[in-house]
Image (tube, rainbow, N blue to C red):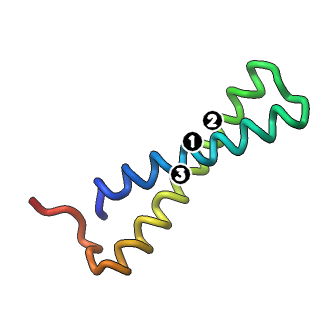
Amino acid sequence: MNWPLFSVIYSMAATVIIGIFMIVALVTGFNQIPHIQMAVAAGILISIPAGLFFTKKIGSITGNEEGYKA
């Protein structure tokens, strides 16, 4: 797996998914600290498979499925 690509995609996916979950939590009235922390934890966990999925997709498009080789 291309770990540098995964780290970039995971960083972007985690930011977006956590932001979406926090906005949903705040709009629906779950505005206390434990609810926000659960939204962040759920976003971090959901970002892992999303990052893996998109890393494999981009790796198959570019032909660089083996990963970074210096």
**In this orientation, which residue lies closer to the viewer: 42 or 18?**
18
Badge 2 element: helix
Give the residue number, with chain letter if any, for mark 1. Answer: 44
Query: Which image quadrant for residue 66?
Result: bottom left
Q: CA distance from mark 1 to mark 3?
A: 9 Å
Nearer to us: label 3 or label 2: 3
Which residue is tagged 2? 41
In the image, farthest residue toward the top: 33
As shown in the figure, which amino acid type bears the numbered disc 1? Ile
The residue wearing badge 3 is 13
Q: Residue at x 30, y 55 (%)?
A: 3
Q: How many marks do you count on the picture?
A: 3
Identify the mark nearer the N-term, 1 or 3. Answer: 3
Which residue sits at x=41%, y=70%? 56
Q: As shown in the figure, which amino acid type bears the numbered disc 2?
A: Ala
Is 33 on the left or on the right of 68, as rendered? right
- Relative to 38, is 55 above or below? below
Q: Position of residue 45 (x, y in %)?
A: 58, 45
What secondary structure is marked by label 1? helix
Q: Quadrant of the C terminus?
A: bottom left
Q: Tell me whether the residue at label 1 lies in contact with that at label 2, contact meaning CB atoms closer than 8 angstroms.
A: yes
Above or below: residue 7 compared with residue 61 = above
Image quarter of residue 15: top right
Mark 3 lies on a secondary structure that is helix
* Label 2 environment density (alpha carbons within 10 Å; few <14, some 14–19, many ≥20): some
Q: Is residue 1 left or right of residue 43?
A: left
- Say which residue appears at 40% left-offset and 72% top-offset: 58
In the picture, the quarter occupied by the N terminus is bottom left
Q: Nearer the viewer, mark 1 or mark 3?
A: 3
State the separation of the CA atoms marked 1 and 2: 5 Å
